[in-house]
Amino acid sequence: MSIKKVHDQDLFHNVIGIGLRMYGNGYPYAPQTVSYITEYCRQQIRHYFIQHNQLVRKSHDYCPLSYLSTLVYTSRHKKYFLKRLQHFFQAKDRPVLQQDELVDNIIKDKKLTMADRFKRICRQTQISIDDNQTKAISSMLDRQRSRQYARLDIYYKSDALTSDDYLLFVEQQHSSFNSLRSLSSIDIQYWLQLNNLTVSNKKSVSKHDLRLTEICVFLIKEILLSLMDKVYHSPIRCDIHDIIRRQHVQNNRLLIQCAFDVIALEFIRQLLRYRTYMHPSIRVTSSTNDILSIDLNDIYHITMPLSYSMLEMLPDEIILEVCRYLHSGDVLYSFFDLNSRLNQTITFYRQHVSLHKTFYMQFIEIFTIILPKIESSIRSLVIFELESPLFFESFKTNHIYEHLEKLTLVNWTDEKLILFLDTLHGMKHFHTLVIQALDLTESVKNINLLKKILGANDNRLTIIVFDHECDAFNLIEEKETETIFSNIIKIDIELQTTKDLLKLVQFTPNVKQIHTTFKRPLTKILFAQEVFTHLTELSVYAMSWFSTFDDLKTLVQISSTIENFSFVLVTRDYSMIDGKHVLSIVPSRVKQFNYSICYHLSDKDDDFNASIIIKSWKSIPIAYSISEHDKRIFLHTILYQPNRLSLRSLFNKNMSTDYNSQIYKKVRHLHVYDTNSLSEISGIVRHCRQILDLIVSIRTLPSRNPDTQKTSIALPYLGRLDFLSIQGTPPDSHYIERILLVAPNLSAISIDFDCLFKLLSDDDQSLSLFYLLHRRIVILCIRFEETVIEKLTAEHIHCIARIFFRVNHMCIDLRNSKLRIESQIISLILKYFPKLMVLSLYGQLSEDINSNKDMLCQYLAEQSIGRLTNVNKFKIDYGKERLKVWM
């Protein structure tokens, strides 16, 4: 079957195109836009019909009724149903002046006015209409017709249409909708893709039931008018696509708000969870310090239907979509053990557990009550350093995590980690260990710690991953050892030099994949024998110094079994960018060769012939960017494979002009350095649209050529960007607003104190920037890099807190300043940041704290304005140069 066509167009496409023109500004919309809105209408109406139980809805006496009769009338009004609806639709096709008389005839014996019925239809079909009208016109029968004529009258009075054009246009509109009314119910079902549903038959529905086509016409008109009203009355200039986008976002927000309303009843559900018939009445202290007296019988009566209507009616897919906006701990804390269906729905959150961003008491409850119930389900687990004390005890009896496959440890120090590793035993499925942001101190030898890691879980681990935020290992501080860890087949690690790599492979002779970052210059190494007998993949990231061609040659020849190479290097050696020279040392057995090189012209060289460099790579596809200003070239094989990219801002000038380029689609971590201003980053960022974090290093450099300071390119949409770090004080700090506008999920920011305070103190800054910071940022890190202030005062903290009111994780880094961590600073932060969960401070502890660590908890409880009323409800973790408060 195919839908009827008018002027070679789908009938619905034609109807909606004319409707958009009439309800809009009178000008035709592009066919692509009309097609988009047509599909939007189809989905909206289809959702409405499906929502009403396959076009039939049961009444309270189990008598089948049509969905429209159920919406418009109660059972006592059924005998007037047909007559009034017929009048209603007749009135819709009459001029406005004739409608008052019809209304008078209709409402003589009414229970509800037609306007009331109209409102009810729109309300129950979840179609938004503008009710903010004066009382004089609020009783008008047909809002649709009054709005469309009012809109057309404005268009007509603007002299854009002649009288004949005006009448012709109105006639076309009537004709198009009448053509739609001529369709059968089967045609409508086909368009809505409902032809497989069971439609009401004559025996189950009154013979006077309104045709499906009339309902479809009504809903199409109202959807279009609702959309165009939003465009027409919008306070800012916008297009219908903007309205659709806003409506989609708003619908999602409403859905999420619905879920959060359920979560807001958590204290009641906790009563249900711990209900006892010995105490039928329980007193609960709410977050506003009000005392609520609740009877358990009332709780059952009130909350269960509400919870059902708000949550249980949502399909699993929607519940899981809502869970994406929550943290794993929130999902477990709020939804687990409410019923078997929800337990099944959140299976993923029972298998992959991360309790980050939970309050201390909430974590205690999850750890002590929920985790023991789901221990057999847990496949992966993320543990932050603050959580470690409880997990120390837990893993001493590690049979409860017998199905654990992957463990991730975040922000640990080597002191705690080496002790924790001793508790990992007997888990036969546990094979992957991920360590993020590891802090190496002088208290533990690097090599001893690494041995502990490699041999953890009784030598069952096969994959070890250290992320790029970990400190680099120094493994050459000990004599030769016979310790062998033949279980390791893949390792990602941060090392100091190539000598550390040689030592590592002596420990792990069966390793097949090594991804390493070298933090110090490569050192020449000689191999007495072949030690890399199983290595098939080697990835090297070395951007901290200048490599030479001999370094590259050594790495390429490190093993005769390697099939995949990946190098990211910086050099002053011209041989490293000569394609013929580089490819000549690559063995023929190599299946994949990913090469990235950043070349800086050495002081001795005079020439910089870019065309010769490019021609030398003609045998292999490459991408490149040239900075003519200081004669540098960034060159790499296509596609760029590493997930990290670090570039000088001047390289943005000659990067590919293809905005849809996929060359850097794998980049997740971007660092743009030597930047004079934030606006210089756009040329690079536009190619890295999948980044998770962005670091911009500001540096005062000599003035550049005028052509390098051209107008910045618009930033792309950065939907995955979550973290922004600004190192230094940019002259265009207002550019942060542009980044926030294109990165709706940006929630964490790291910034120098001088830059932040200058930003907040600037009266000329846009209020929208402060609004975005206030709404978005929940994680804030403030660095004090040689700051000019002598003391962090209450005024400073209060000024920051006024904007970052929603922050729940805060980090103060004083390691590079003369300031010290003082108890007064802690109490001030707790006072001005009421939503704070975790406060981390790095730097030297004051004498007052060092000498009274045992008294600090009591001091904070006294000074925190009621937040920390009980020393057992928060936790303080100390280190040599750190202090963390978990609330």
Image: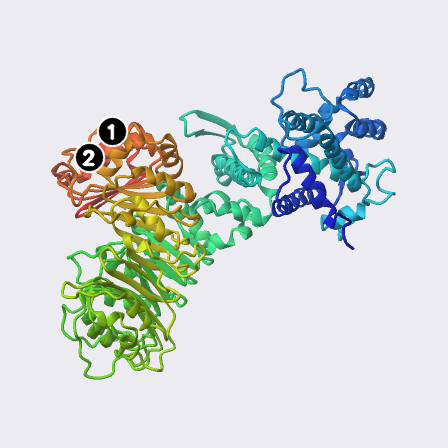
In the image, 411 versus 99, the foreground residue is: 99
Mark 1 burial class by Cα count in 10 Å: few <14, some 14-19, many 20+: some
Give how far across and how far down residue 442 sits, in percent.
Answer: 15, 57
Label 2 packing within 10 angstroms: few (<14), some (14-19), many (20+): some
Q: Quadrant of residue 434?
A: bottom left
Q: Is residue 377 above or below residue 739?
A: below
* Residue that numbered label 2 is attached to: 823
Give the structural element (helix, strand or loop) at label 1.
Answer: helix
Tag 2: amino acid: Ser
Q: Tell me if I can see residue 256 in this picture.
A: yes
Label 1 with label 2: CB-CB less than 8 Å: yes
Q: Quadrant of the C terminus?
A: top left
Amino acid type, callout 1: Gln
Question: Any mark on residue 863, and which?
Answer: 1
Q: Nearer the viewer, residue 873 or 822?
A: 822
- How far is mark 1 from mark 2, CA to CA? 10 Å
Q: Nearer the viewer, residue 804 or 99?
A: 99
Q: Position of residue 511 (x, y in %)?
A: 32, 74
Apparent side of residue 418 relative to residue 283 in the rendered image (left or right): left
Image location of residue 352, percent across then percent down: 44, 55
Query: What is the total number of numbered labels drawn onto the structure image?
Result: 2
On the image, the x and y values in percent for residue 583 come to 31, 77
Is residue 459 visible from the viewing direction of this image? no
Q: Using residue 169 as the reference point, say whether residue 368 is left or right of it.
A: left
Residue at 38% over, 77% down: 591
